[in-house]
């Protein structure tokens, strides 16, 4: 201790320092300029936090997992409250109690105490993660249903701070509902569940109403047509056309293709192994369970002794680009027909899809024209004047009978032979496809490619069949079975 005092005295009474400009022009009180470490007061660590930290050094903690330690420490601190000002921000991946120093722990528990009073104040992102970990581990709150509500409130209040955190907490909320086998309606407003609900409307398009179908298309379409200038100007017309075209294309794929329209757009549901609470600190206390749980008819889970499997539509579960291209093509064609001021580039869809959209729009225009022609507006106030004018006209008219003149007999038109519109090369290529011959050799003899010949035949046959006759969606061209017999007449 005397050595420390000697050092302080030598510093404070050094003549060279006292004569320097830094000290010469200043006046100091009797407050010490330099303090000993023992003179600096630090906040005392609460005993509860000391006891919680000690759990990490127990013999059991040495062979248990970090998830077990987090759960054990969390249950120990479940009802703890604190009042401590902490304003420092920091970054920590997979934060747990063991990773935080005393200031950070006191800051977290103080923030959590305010949270329980309904005060959602600014906090470092690791605090939000830790709170989510607590809730999915069953720490805090009275019931599983209340924890789901708190997880959703946590997402609403802090999800905007970080997109990845927002996505993860929403996923953990759904996983917690599955883990506790809660009512799926508790999470009906989560994006993943809303995706399934919208997809169900499209899968059951024959039973879905127009409003339901359009709402589902709006939610799943990769092309945000609700922000389209044309849709804003003509919402009812766009809605009627979109619903009609989806139904027409569903009919077409059901009758003319092996896959349905929804299978073509979204694929098939698949059952795969899965892990609940991925990227979270979670201690599974009920691993040896066996049960089945369904969020919806197209999204369900099975648990067999802790092994989880999930049945659902995988892939990109947000906006569907194929459906978006169909809606964009519809938007483009509507603008062209109405000579809309703001133009749009056409979408990348197949020729048959574009033709089908055009035919449906033509049919809509024709139905509108017929309906307007059949509409009769009668002004009853003018009926008396019409009758009087008719009486005057009747009295003035003198109609002479005209002799009956026989109509000339119709001259029969000469019959013309229906020649095939196909070239010799196209007939050879089509004959090979129908009879199972070497269609590749037929294309080589024609000096062309199979895909080019198939496109040319489809274009020429469209007027006769109103459909594509050769399916080129796979690597091997294939004549559509429904048209095979009729196509033999052309070869």
Image (spheres, rainbow, N blue to C red):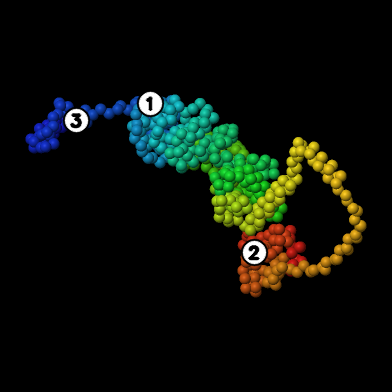
**How far across and how far down the image is residue 477, in percent?**
65, 63
Whole-number angstrom distance, CA of label 1 to CA of label 2: 74 Å
Front: mark 2 or 3: 2
Q: Nearer the viewer, residue 66 or 27?
A: 27
Q: Nearer the viewer, residue 78 or 192?
A: 192
- 112 left or right of 177 in image: left
How many circles with numbers are drawn on the protein?
A: 3
**Circle 3 residues within 10 Å: few <14, some 14–19, many ≥20:** few
Q: Which residue is mark 1?
A: 82
Q: Is residue 428 above or below residue 78?
A: below
Return the mark for residue 455. 2
* Residue 260 in sight from this viewpoint: no
Q: Which residue is mark 3?
A: 35
Q: Nearer the viewer, residue 212 or 305?
A: 212
Quarter of the figure with the C terminus: bottom right
Whole-number angstrom distance, CA of label 1 to CA of label 3: 30 Å
Looking at the image, is mark 1 or mark 2 earlier in the sequence? Answer: 1
**Circle 2 residues within 10 Å: few <14, some 14–19, many ≥20:** some
- 335 left or right of 85 in image: right
Q: Residue at x 90, y 56 (%)?
A: 402
Q: Secondary structure at mark 2?
A: helix
Whole-number angstrom distance, CA of label 2 to CA of label 3: 89 Å
């Amino acid at each position: 201790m005397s050595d420390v005092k000697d050092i302080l005295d030598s510093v404070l009474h050094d003549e060279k320092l006292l004569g320097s400009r830094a000290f010469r022009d200043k006046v100091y009180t009797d407050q010490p300029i330099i303090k000993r470490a023992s003179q600096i007061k630090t906040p005392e660590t609460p005993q509860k936090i000391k006891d919680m930290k000690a759990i990490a050094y127990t013999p059991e903690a040495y062979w248990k997992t970090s998830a077990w330690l987090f759960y054990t420490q969390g249950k120990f601190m479940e009802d703890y409250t604190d009042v401590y000002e902490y304003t420092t921000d920091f970054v920590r991946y997979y934060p747990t109690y063991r990773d935080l120093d005393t200031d950070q722990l006191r800051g977290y528990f103080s923030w959590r105490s305010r949270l329980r009073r309904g005060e959602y104040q600014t906090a470092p992102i690791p605090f939000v993660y830790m709170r989510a970990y607590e809730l999915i581990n069953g720490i805090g709150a009275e019931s599983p249903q209340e924890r789901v509500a708190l997880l959703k409130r946590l997402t609403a209040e802090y999800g905007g701070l970080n997109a990845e955190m927002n996505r993860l907490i929403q996923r953990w909320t759904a996983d917690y509902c599955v883990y506790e086998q809660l009512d799926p309606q508790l999470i009906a407003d989560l994006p993943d569940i809303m995706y399934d609900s919208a997809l169900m409307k499209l899968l059951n398009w024959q039973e879905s109403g127009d409003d339901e179908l359009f709402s589902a298309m709006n939610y799943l379409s990769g092309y945000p047509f609700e922000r389209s200038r044309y849709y804003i100007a003509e919402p009812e017309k766009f809605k009627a056309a979109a619903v009609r075209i989806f139904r027409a294309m569903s009919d077409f794929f059901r009758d003319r293709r092996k896959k349905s329209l929804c299978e073509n757009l979204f694929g098939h549901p698949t059952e795969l192994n899965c892990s609940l609470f991925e990227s979270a600190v979670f201690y599974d206390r009920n691993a040896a369970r066996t049960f089945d749980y369904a969020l919806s008819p197209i999204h369900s889970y099975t648990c067999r002794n802790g092994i989880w499997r999930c049945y659902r539509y995988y892939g990109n579960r947000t906006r569907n680009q194929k459906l978006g291209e169909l809606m964009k093509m519809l938007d483009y064609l509507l603008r062209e027909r109405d000579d809309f001021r703001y133009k749009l580039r056409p979408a990348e869809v197949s020729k048959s899809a574009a033709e089908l959209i055009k035919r449906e729009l033509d049919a809509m225009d024709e139905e509108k024209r017929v309906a307007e022609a059949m509409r009769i507006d009668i002004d009853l106030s003018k009926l008396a004047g019409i009758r009087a004018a008719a009486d005057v006209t009747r009295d003035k008219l003198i109609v002479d009978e005209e002799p009956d003149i026989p109509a000339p007999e119709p001259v029969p038109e000469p019959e013309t032979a229906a020649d095939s519109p196909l070239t010799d090369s196209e007939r050879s290529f089509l004959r090979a496809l129908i009879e199972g011959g070497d269609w590749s050799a037929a294309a080589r003899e024609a000096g062309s490619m199979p895909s080019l010949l198939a496109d040319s035949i489809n274009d020429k046959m469209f007027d006769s069949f109103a459909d594509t006759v050769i399916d080129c969606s796979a690597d091997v061209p294939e004549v559509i079975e429904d048209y095979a017999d009729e196509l033999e007449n052309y070869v």
